[in-house]
Image (tube, helix red, strand yellow):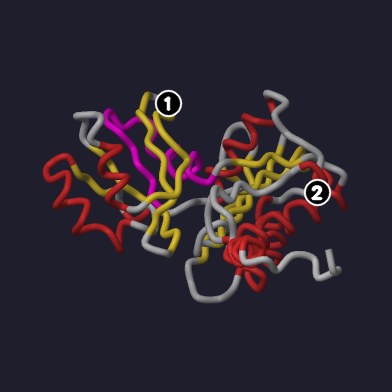
Amino acid sequence: MYVLGIEAATPVAGVAVIDEKKVLSERFVNNKRTHSVNLLPMVKAAIEEAGINKEELACIAVSAGPGSFTGLRIGMTTAKTLAQVWNIPVAAVPTLDALAYSLAGYKGLICPILNARKNEVYAAVYRGRPGELERLAGPMAVSCGELMEELKKWTDDVLFLGDGIDLYREQLLQELGERVFFAPRAVALPRGAVVAELGLEMYKRQRVASPLEVTPEYIRPSEAEVKWAEKQKAGGKCGCGN
């Protein structure tokens, strides 16, 4: 059984092919090129390097958010289009779960944070256990200060990862002091192989869906939706004379 994993919800573009025993191939790019440029060539290369045919894939796992609105749309569209053409289901993997999963054996709290812009982060709080995770809070879009208040509910050490740590490192250290630890760079960003592994588990548990049923997990409305809502409040409704 083979699963293709796609990560595009963050600045990282990641693609991997796994089976039930190992990672067969993986591609990881963290540059300024858009995911629309990177993803399809990466998918093609990962399948070829895995030594399989696309017909052998059981499903496609895709990072479903929260994350970049543009990245989520590109990743989702790529996964859903390929799955529809190849007639296979899609596993929508929560992005923060995929981030934290690599560190599931950590004996404290695990807190992935992603830059949500507008002085906010996308975050969740997990307790690590060997081979599994317990989600304690989130996913949420909050200010760093609000996240600190959430974390003060517990006394455990906290291991942070994600692209938000570079922006908020000093604030994290000031607020939580000796409780703060940062994940190594090699596991601090999302990986296509982790998305694929979680997708494989979802497939086994029949938690997959047809491509037409899968939707992103945005957490908060997009800028366009916010502006539309503001316009509606200001009286700019349908323009039909009613």
Return the residue nearer the eye: 131 or 92: 92
Residue 48 shown left or right of residue 145 in the figure: right
Where does the image place residue 136, in percent across and percent down from the top left? 39, 29
| Residue topped by disc 2 | 83
**Secondary structure state at the residue bearing disc 1:** strand
Residue at position x 63%, y 37% from top?
199
Position of 94 compared to 79: left or right? Answer: left
Residue plotted at (42% across, 64% down): 118
Amino acid type for the residue under numbered disc 1: Glu
Q: Pick the residue in front: 47 or 30.
A: 30
Instruction: State the image quarter where residue 211 is shown.
Output: top right
Please state, as top left, top right, bottom left or bottom right, where the C terminus lies in the image. Answer: bottom right
Nearer to us in this view, 226 or 65: 226
Work out which quarter of the rendered image holds the N terminus and state it. Answer: top right
Is any part of residue 88 visible from this angle?
A: yes
Q: SS of the residue at dot 2?
A: helix
Residue 155 sits in quarter: top left
Residue at the far front in the pictured view: 242
Contact (Cβ within 8 Å) of mark 2 with mark 1:
no
Residue visible at 87% across and 44% down?
A: 87
* Range of residues picked out in magenta: 95-113
108 drawn magenta: yes
Q: Does the magenta stretch include residue 210?
A: no
| Image position, residue 59 (x, y; %) | 74, 40
Is residue 42 visible in the rendered image? The answer is: no
Within 10 angstroms of label 2, few (less than 14), some, or many (20 or more) residues?
many
Q: In this view, does 216 lie to the left or right of 30?
A: right
Q: Which residue lies furthest to the bottom in this view?
A: 33
Q: Is residue 126 above or below residue 189?
A: above
